[in-house]
Image: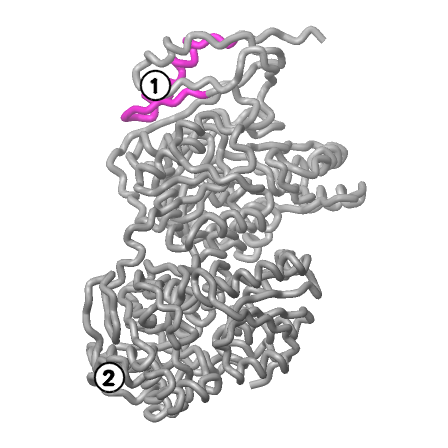
Amino acid sequence: MRFESITDLIGHTPLVRLAVDSAPDVRVYAKLELQNPYGMKDRVAQNIILRARQSGELLPGAPIVESSSGTMALGVALVGAALGHEVHIVTDPRIDRVTLAKLRALGCRLHIVETMTSHGWQSARLECLQKLLTDLPGAFWPQQYTNPDNPAAYRRLAEELIADLGHIDLLVGSVGSGGSLCGSSRALRAALPDLRVLGVDCVGSVLFDQPDRPGRLQSGLGNSLLPKNLDRRLIDEIHWLNDHEAFAATRRLAAEQQIFGGNTSGSVYRVLRWAAERAAPGSTLVGILPDRGDRYAETVFDDEHWQEKGLAALPVAASPRLVGYGTTVESWSRAVNRGAESSRQYLLLVESNTTGTGMLALHRTRELGLVPVLLTSAPERYAGLAEAGCEVLLCETNRLVEVRAAILDRFRREELAGVATTSEFYVPAVAELTAWLGLAGNPAQAVATCREKGALREALAAAGVHQPRFAFLAEGFGPQDVRAAVEAVGLPCVVKPVDDSGSNGVLRCESAEEVGRQAESILAPVTNGRGLPTARRVLVEEYLDGPELSVELFGADHLLGITDKQVTGEPYFVETRHLFPAELAPPLAEQITDTVRRAVAAAGLVLGASHTEVKLTPDGPAIIEINPRLAGGMIPELIRLATGVEPLEQQLRAAGGLPAELEPSLHRHAGIRFLTAGYPGVLDRITGCEEARAVPGIAQVTITAKAGSDVTPARNAYDRLGYLIAHGDRQEDVLAALDEAERRLTIAISRRTS
């Protein structure tokens, strides 16, 4: 097998079947991560460093500083040196001579602490590392214990196991930083939800609520601190081995399987053998073996070292003693893992709508038994935030690097249930965060495709999904570009920004000159209403004349319903009424739904709500846009009133890893009518609200415009004055209630005199 560089070699590790005692047809495999160039942590170092370079956290040539006495040091040294970075490794006197020689050969600068501090060698190393970060401006610290790019590195390992074996019943792995076993099992359980996971720790490690013993001899697993990357929710059972048991198991691994591993590999092997003896016929078991034995020639494999450390005096168990979680152990013991049972579960919301579902989402999160946390750069923009009962985490939400830093500083991984938003502008950031953290979410590329309407057009074209003809204009376009776009789509056409919402900037144009003017208007602002950069691209597309609908899906294919939509007279396309569900002949409804499912699949969405706008044309349903979020325009409230299913709650459940509850309990109708100004002026007042609320079937009368504000006939969703919501057993009852409620309102507007 040929590779273009030493770093390309990382991964691609062999999977070897072991000869162990077991029931018939039990397959037992060892994933030899020790066959990476320097060990398993090569994966971690590569993923963290490459991600940091991509995000700008690590600049070319900047120094890298890490605390490690083993394979993480070697991985960082390997990748850092290969990419041209100066590498500083902070370690302690326990480091073996082989690792020390390798680090020096790779050109590392070594900093060996001399004495333990409050939490043993670990805290002593971290104190030294902090001083280095101060002394080396621009230095990058991989932070293997807290950085989610550590467990994320093992998604590829999980993919390799599934590709090789198809199905796995049991995974056994060691626990140290929380990276390998948590990252592997999290990714595996996405495909294999019934997978059982056994974690291997050492006596004297605090990871699973045992008392700390800083003098333990094992390295590569266990810890004196609780790493933030450790997610104990993923581990079903924990095994502890003392130094004697671990070292003996390592020698047996070499003698019985001819695998020269380190003490971490030996401990995993011992537990894997025990599990194999008890496995049901036909089961498949895998153990992850992280480290080679060359580092342990003078310890694990040295009889004099055993005698010097008094290992023979330690108790040795032939099989693990089952103990209650929290019982102090001295030799091989096991317990059902309860390490995360008392952890509060947080659902993070990155910004939100300033009204409506934004604050409601915080309340609904609490009702689900989760703790809501609003990440925002401006809490003052949210009316009612103080009453929402949530934690507010202040950070610059327009900078993903700063959002990540805020999350790392505040939370441990096992405390995070999910990340969500009710603001369309932050859906891409949420997708990036869920991918980074390994939480439930849509693929970041799928969300980016939907948010950038031009990319969506290209994806749908590649999949053969019916949509308008389209062309693009970008900065610096000229008359010839406009003419080419118009020739491609025809006149009249629709001109819109590729990345805005609420019909903002959408205009039907009758001439090439009008297309040019609208495109210039769209390209003028460099940021949107939330301060995020605009895409600097304009979509010019065929105008389709026909009824407008939207299809509300949940997940890849579950239909919540189809919404009948009414928009303002052209040239603008502002929604003025929604009716749910749309009254359609079943064959047409099925045709529309099938088209949307194919479109959503082409975009790559898999989780939660999507809102797809459709035009009915003589050639069939055509996709106008796909929004990777809940519908706006209060459509979720219409769905709740008509079906009993609350889409907002289901979206939060999906984000928090809870099962969605999508079966309708009602079969009714609901509708909304938006209030708009008939002419430009100043809003004096809107009266008759109580009279409108008294109309049978009216559920809400909401005024959003303030007296004294300038108003205009609606050009986008932000120009609307308020809305009425009604529900009833029949669509005609809903329409009648909306008509009567609107008749009872008086909207007084003073015309402008100039």
Q: Is residue 585 visible?
A: no
Question: Where 477 sits versus 556, above or below?
Answer: above
Q: Is residue 69 magenta?
A: no
Q: In this figure, which colouring scheme has been used for the structure?
A: one colour
Question: Where 535 sits versus 71, above or below?
Answer: above
Element type at marker 2? loop
Residue 87 in percent (x, y) is at 63, 70
Residue 145 in percent (x, y) is at 47, 62
Question: Where 446 sits versus 22, above or below?
Answer: above
Q: If the image is split into quadrants, where does the C terminus sit? A: top right
Q: Which stretch appears magenta?
A: 723-747
Q: Is residue 732 magenta?
A: yes
Q: Residue at x 27, y 87 (%)?
A: 20
**Res 683 quadrant in image:** top right
> What residue is pinned by disc 2?
25
Q: Residue at x 63, y 8 (%)?
A: 751
Q: Is residue 292 visible?
A: yes
Tag shown at residue 698: 1
Question: Camera-side residue: 308 or 338?
Answer: 308
